Image: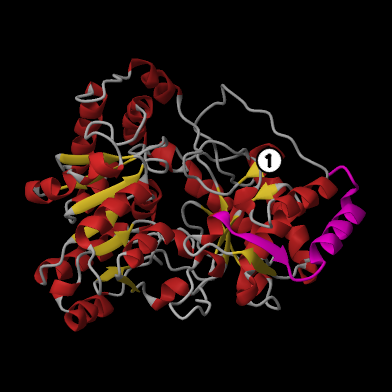
Amino acid sequence: MPKITFYQHEPIPMEMHKVKIVQQLHLLPAQQRLEKMREAGFNTFQLHNGDIFLDMLTDSGVNAMSDRMQSAMLVADDAYAGSETFFKMQRKLEEIFGIHYCLPAHQGRACENILATRFVKPGNCVIMNYHFTTAKAHITRLGGRVEELVKKEGLVSHSDLPFKGDIDLEALEACILREGPENVPFVRLEAGTNLIGGQPISCANIEAATEICRKHGVMTVLDASLLQDNLYFIKTREPEMRDRTVREIARKIADQFDIIYFSARKFGFARGGAILVRDEALFHSMEDLIPMFEGFLTYGGMSVKEMEAMTVGFDESMDMDVISQGPQFIDYCVRRLDEYGIPVITPGGGLGAHIDVKEFLPDVPQEQYSAGALACALYICGGIRGMERGTLSEEREPDGTERIASMELLRLAFPRRVFTLSQTEYVIDRVKWLYDHRNLVGGLRFVHEPATLRFFTGVLEPVSDWPEKLAAAYRADFGDEQ
């Protein structure tokens, strides 16, 4: 990763690629955006992509492919069984992670379904540094429960702690002893804690946590979906790792785990997923679930073209020039927002910039889904689609009461190699305007509330006419056509 110094300009992140294919964007007038938000049931997931200017909902499956990835798709072997494309992918994963056995699946949550189905029984406790929505949903649907043991400092929104995804080691051992190792099917560590700001976990913490698990005979599982960002942070923030290559760090981490799974919609920059299993007996205990839920063992529900592309993408995920752009753009966005006094999660993590909505909208209760409301407000005031990561993304308690999220965040994801610096500046500008008019934003309530993963398909409505007032204020400052 070259260090680029400017002669007469402040340091800014540099794209280590050139743009060869473009897609036209459209910015609807503010009044139309209000109408589209209403039609979407005040749920950004339900917006049509053609009505969005900058889509920062997620980095899952929407990253730009390289020229090498695109060209690799042309040589895919589309055999139903025994595809050479699969074996090529398997060899590349073994080269990087040192694990031979590979179960393909169509994306990360499919891997979570396989793992939960195989290992989780009613009453079991799965320990994590922090949960992800689908990982938790698969465990709870089978009668298990999740214990989140991220260090308490990880939930402090504004700090300079470099590894806010670290698990509390004392709490981990205490939980295993309290539950009994036989009641803990596995400990899951997430490399890049999605729901608390994409914050990384350190290599030292991984080693210490997995050593505790080995001592008590508890299986270890790594969610490597956001691994490329975490590798960047380990190399740049963990002094002991600075002289290691990205590949060396990846192998050092992989060596600690019994099972690694990932969504290649994030790690690999394509669309798919896989479970890597160190032990042959464990592999065979899960292999029958792949044809049952996903597809045959050499495609697992994936397009073979995507498998060819992601095999190249795995190599690119070991290149600092490639994996540095996302964290650098996110860091730039976070620092600029912070300079404006806007409450954001610091330091900048992976995946995206995260706004602390409890501080941004202190007068909107979390029970009124304040992060979801702010996501709707940002679309109305800029055509920008972000994602709520807070109470709306939680599931209700068994008695029907609302489970209040530890952190109430609006995530502005940065799909890799997609946005320019000028588009990033536009986002910063519109968030600043919205912050200065935050008193106009109110809450939401459900009209239709699904029982599980309600944030995907739920329909909501505002608790007052605040969207109309917000749109009117925006038009007064910017005119009808922006």
Which quadrant holds residue 373?
bottom right
| 223 with respect to 258 (left or right) | right
Query: Label 1, on which residue?
Result: 422
- Nearest the eye: 277 or 438: 277
- Nearest the eye: 298 or 215: 298
Residue 222, horizontal then vertical, whole percent? 27, 55
| 58 with respect to 341 (left or right) | left
Which quadrant holds residue 90?
top left
Residue 467, horizontal then vertical, whole percent? 79, 61
Asked if residue 343 shows in the view, the reply is no
Residue 170, horizontal then vertical, whole percent? 25, 79
| 103 with respect to 140 (left or right) | left
Above/below status of 309 relative to 52: above
Which quadrant holds residue 466?
bottom right
Q: Amino acid at mark 1?
A: Ser
Above/below status of 452 relative to 64: below
User: Magenta span has 320?
Assistant: no
Q: Quadrant of the N terminus?
A: top left
Label 1: how many residues lie within 10 Å, few (<14), some (14-19) or many (20+)? few
**Magenta span:** 457-482
- Nearest the eye: 474 or 208: 474
Q: Residue at x 43, y 61 (%)?
A: 133
